[in-house]
Image (spheres, helix red, strand yellow):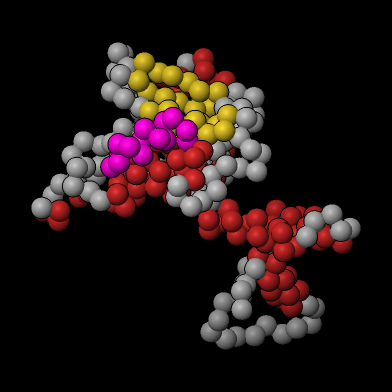
Amino acid sequence: MTTTRRDFLATALTAAGAAATPGMPAHQHDHEHQAVPSDFALRVKSLESLLVEKGLVDRAALDALVDAYEHKIGPRNGARVVARAWVDPAYKTRLLADANNAMAEFGYVYVSQQGDRMVVVENTPRVHNLIVCTLCSCYPWPVLGLPPVWYKSAPYRSRAVIDPRSVLREFGLELAEDVEVCVWDSTAEVRYLVLPERPASSERLSEEELAALVTRDAMVGVATVVLRPSEGNDERHT
Ligand code: FE
């Protein structure tokens, strides 16, 4: 039987109710009691119950949405696209020319329900790309999942365009002076993904191993993809 988040909350609430029953003697046994949900979780539960009761949302649709974002959508999708572009020059050409169609080759629906257009911008030794949404928090959800809190923050949204180098420095990325920084402002219609540079000495890594190196931050442009010593062309691959 599949356990849903509602089952979890219901179990937790029952446990919390039992624990709070007056006059019940304390008991001793070898299992741990479930923790009471946070105020935030309880508020979400209350809101969800009201919306369902009023017929405004469907519980099955909510569970399907949560499951999709927990298990099917996220930065791993973007990482697979990046790794394919690194190992397959023809794919990279298609990706840079028409990202929506190139991403659809993976069998996933990379076009969000808003019908937005994906654009992939390539980092090179001379150009570094950075993505922001100055207006709000537009983000390529199908390939990167939910946006991190800092991406939605006012300081990032304003400073990324005013002084991108200092923002990158705070992320630990120091760019050489002769590297041009291109900042791309996402909108509801056009969303961007950075194709990071393939790390040096990664020639012998498989596409799958390469994908494992690609981080969300690298695909937003606040980091580069690095090869840890144990992941390079060491004896495991020779
Ligand atoms: Fe936005």
Tell me where residue 138 sits by quadrant.
top right
| Residue 9, visible in the rendered structure | no
The correct choice, above or below, for 104 with respect to 186 in the image is below
Tell me where residue 37 sits by quadrant.
bottom right
Q: Which quarter of the image is occupied by the N terminus?
A: bottom right
Q: Which residue is pictured at 53% across the width and 56% down the height?
A: 72
The correct choice, above or below, for 143 with respect to 5 in the image is above
Q: In this image, 43 relative to 34: left or right?
A: right
x, y (%) of residue 159? Answer: 53, 20
x, y (%) of residue 169? Answer: 39, 24
* Residue 236 magenta: no
Q: Which residue is pictured at 44% across the width and 30% down the height?
A: 97
Q: In this image, 70 relative to 226: left or right?
A: right
Q: Which residue is pictured at 82% across the width and 60% down the height?
A: 52
Q: Which residues are magenta?
A: 86-99
* Residue 93 magenta: yes
x, y (%) of residue 119? Answer: 49, 30
Numbered marks: total: 0
Q: In this image, 106 relative to 83: left or right?
A: right
| Residue 211, visible in the rendered structure | yes
Tell me where residue 68 sits by quadrant.
bottom right
Q: Nearer the viewer, residue 53 or 89?
A: 89
x, y (%) of residue 76? Answer: 44, 49
Q: Nearer the viewer, residue 125 or 44?
A: 125
> Which SS does the magenta portion mostly show?
helix
Q: Which residue is pictured at 68% across the width and 71% down the height?
A: 7
Q: In this image, 119 relative to 206: left or right?
A: right
